[in-house]
Image: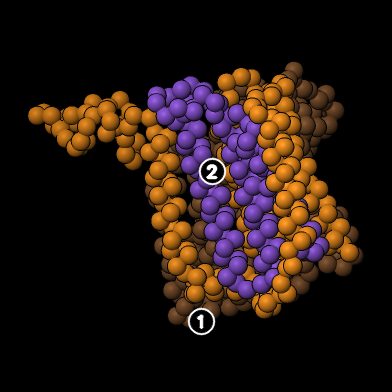
Chain colours: A orange, B brown, C purple
């Protein structure tokens, strides 16, 4: 009973937060409405007995929203305070499409004959997740790791303006005849600055 | 969690955190007064005078300020502190022993990222915004070392539940064989409270940054909330590294409070040894030096646990 | 809290996210829409896991979805930075051609 009440409260919060993202006037409010929606979804995942994944979702999403707010403020050309903004295109078309997709999904949800439950949950779900990741599903983690590393490298390459290699060419540690560093870079790279 | 325990949690924990926060601010004032050559007694009384002044002061707002987000962030600091403390076991008494208590603490200290930035943003003032951004720049540096430092006691105990972490220290406290983790954890606690050497977000060079436009009860909530978060972080280190409620004679709950006070005294004593750290310098130190150190610590802990079939 | 109800909530989140991703002009707002969609998928995955097959394998899939969310956000911000730097705009409408 309590669980059902909490579920409906979090569900209402998640959907209201999601709608608020595209309705409010301010960029920061949109970002934090999304954060509220994510926290509600994380709480619902905890209600589904996935403690670790639910709390990790809350953690990661709060961190991402804090960073997203920085990027929002950086790129919006106008005053990002409480000003009515309506930067949309094809509003009607998207709304109709979204409503049709929701109707199709809702129809599918109620019409599909869902199978019976297979298996039963382990006693300590976090420990069983850990055993799975380190044991039978280690390949998944091994694959995610170079993917994340590639993301870091790709994002840095995209976001970096002309770097030192662009400006000064190869062999950045070359020296002139007197022993001074040849690329006379005012913003010296590397560590130990 | 039974209903008397819930009532006790709702009343005792916020009051306890507030009392310890006031005491920490008091001692900090005394340490500052002693270092600057003033009267130590005035230093002790400084937070009380400031509280009395701020309670009577008029609240201020600015045109175009996002008041909703600003006030929520101001009140949120104290609430975050109580949320962090509610998972701590006080000896045999606990209020909310989550099976993932360690990760819960981590999630709340990430909530602090949002709160400090919103404090900077909501005021619609450029100095506040610079303070908020400085906090985020600093947070990017300490968060990964903090997460790895929190993993070491979990490996030592084989569980994310704080009761298990506390029980695994019955023969030897974790602080003895995880010193790097403990030091990184304490530094991160000071950093996410925007206190001591990590208070660039409130720095005098940007007109006290996040505090610039705050006045009256809002300023009191932020200044008090800062110390409350510091107290909560110090209290959380007790079940993680200092054996929880273990100790002779007194009940476990009292020992937790005593150890928290000891940790707070330690932080207050060494605060003036360190100058304020610039966020861009902290980035280099954190990513190039501290992260490898913490990873080596994790490897050592994992090897010891594997060889010993459990904690030391 | 049956399977159908949780899936309904996740379908609602997905639909709202789809509306946002299709109708917003600012790149970061489009990313918010996509984040909502992936969030809906995460919730649906959790519900299907608990009600149909609560084995550890399903939890690993949820971790993969979380990783996908993180990767999407990182690359989205990098692309937004590059578009802003080269075209001095954050609108998707000004980035419809590949040529500079």
| Closer to the camera in the image, A60 or B208 | A60
Q: Are marks 1 and 2 in contact (CB under 8 Å)?
A: no
Q: Which residue is mark 1?
A: B309
Which residue corresponds to the image point at 65% horizontal and 29% vertical from the top-left? A90
Tag 1 secondary structure: loop
Rendered position, B81 above or below B75:
below
- Closest to the observer, B23 or B291: B291
Which of discs 1 and 2 lies nearer the camera? The answer is: 2
Q: What residue did someone put label 2 on?
A: C73
- Position of A1 with respect to B14 (left or right) is right
B273 vs A16, nearest the viewer = A16
Secondary structure, mark 2, is helix
Tell me the quarter of the image containing the N terminus of chain C. bottom right
Does residue B110 appear left or right of residue A158 in this picture? right
The picture quadrant where one finds residue A188 is top left
Residue C98 place in picture, x, y as percent: 42, 29
Q: Residue C79 in the image: state x and y as whole percent.
A: 47, 35
- Whether residue A137 can be seen here: yes
Residue at the image position 48 percent from the left and 81 percent from the top: B308
Tell me the chain of label 1: B
* Discs 1 and 2 lie in a common subunit: no
Q: Position of residue C53 (x, y in %)?
A: 66, 72
**In percent of the image, x 85 and y 61: which residue is there?**
A4
Q: Please determine whether, in this image, residue B123 is positioned above or below residue A139.
A: above
Please tell me which residue is depicted at 27% across the width and 34% down the height of the picture.
A165
Give the Cα distance between marks 1 and 2: 40 Å
Q: Is residue B6 visible?
A: no
């Amino acid at each position: 009973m309590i669980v059902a009440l909490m579920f409906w409260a979090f569900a209402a919060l998640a959907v209201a937060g999601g709608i608020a993202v595209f309705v409010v006037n301010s960029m920061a409010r949109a970002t934090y409405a999304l954060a509220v929606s994510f926290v509600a979804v994380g709480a619902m995942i905890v209600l589904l007995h996935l403690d670790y994944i639910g709390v990790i979702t809350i953690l990661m999403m709060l961190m991402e929203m804090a960073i997203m707010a920085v990027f929002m403020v950086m790129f919006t050309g106008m005053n990002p305070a409480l000003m009515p903004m309506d930067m949309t295109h094809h509003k009607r078309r998207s709304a109709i499409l979204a409503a049709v997709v929701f109707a199709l999904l809702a129809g599918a949800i109620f019409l599909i004959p869902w199978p019976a439950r297979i298996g039963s949950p382990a006693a300590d779900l976090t420990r069983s997740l850990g055993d799975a990741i380190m044991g039978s599903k280690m390949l998944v983690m091994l694959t995610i790791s170079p993917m994340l590393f590639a993301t870091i490298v790709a994002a840095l390459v995209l976001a970096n303006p002309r770097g030192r290699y662009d400006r000064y060419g190869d062999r950045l540690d070359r020296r002139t005849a007197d022993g001074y560093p040849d690329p006379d870079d005012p913003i010296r790279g590397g560590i130990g600055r | 969690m039974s209903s008397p325990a819930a009532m006790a949690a709702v009343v005792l924990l916020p009051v306890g955190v507030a009392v310890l926060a006031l005491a920490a601010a008091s001692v900090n004032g005394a340490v500052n007064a002693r270092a600057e050559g003033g009267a130590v007694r005035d230093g002790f009384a400084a937070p009380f005078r400031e509280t009395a002044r701020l309670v009577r002061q008029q609240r201020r707002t600015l045109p175009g300020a996002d008041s909703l987000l600003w006030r929520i962030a101001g009140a949120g600091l104290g609430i975050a502190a109580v949320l962090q403390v509610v998972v701590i076991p006080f000896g045999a008494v606990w209020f909310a022993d989550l099976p993932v208590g360690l990760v819960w603490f981590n999630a709340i200290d990430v909530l602090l990222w949002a709160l400090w930035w919103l404090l900077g943003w909501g005021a619609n003032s450029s100095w506040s915004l610079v303070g908020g951004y400085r906090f985020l720049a600093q947070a990017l540096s300490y968060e990964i070392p903090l997460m790895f430092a929190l993993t070491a006691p979990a490996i030592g105990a084989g569980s994310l539940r704080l009761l298990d972490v506390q029980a695994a220290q019955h023969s030897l406290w974790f602080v003895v064989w995880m010193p790097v983790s403990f030091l990184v954890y304490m530094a991160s606690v000071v950093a996410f409270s925007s206190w001591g050497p990590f208070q660039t977000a409130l720095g005098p060079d940007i007109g006290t940054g996040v505090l610039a436009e705050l006045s009256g009860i809002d300023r009191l909530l932020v200044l008090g909330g800062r110390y409350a978060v510091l107290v909560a972080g110090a209290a959380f280190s007790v079940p993680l590294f200092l054996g929880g409620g273990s100790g002779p004679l007194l009940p476990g709950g009292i020992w937790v409070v005593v150890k928290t006070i000891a940790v707070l005294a330690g932080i207050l004593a060494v605060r003036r040894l360190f100058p304020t750290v610039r966020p861009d310098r902290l980035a280099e130190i954190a990513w190039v030096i501290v992260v490898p150190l913490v990873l080596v610590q994790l490897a050592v802990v994992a090897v010891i646990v594997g060889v010993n079939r459990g904690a030391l | 809290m049956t399977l159908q109800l949780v899936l309904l909530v996740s379908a609602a989140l997905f639909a709202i996210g789809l509306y946002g991703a299709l109708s917003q002009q600012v790149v970061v707002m489009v990313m918010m829409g996509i984040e909502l969609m992936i969030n809906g998928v995460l919730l649906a995955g959790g519900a299907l896991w608990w009600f149909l097959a609560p084995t550890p394998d399903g939890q690993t899939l949820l971790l993969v979805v979380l990783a996908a969310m993180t990767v999407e956000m990182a690359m989205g911000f990098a692309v937004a930075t590059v578009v802003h730097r080269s075209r001095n705009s954050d609108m998707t409408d000004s980035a419809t051609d590949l040529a500079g």
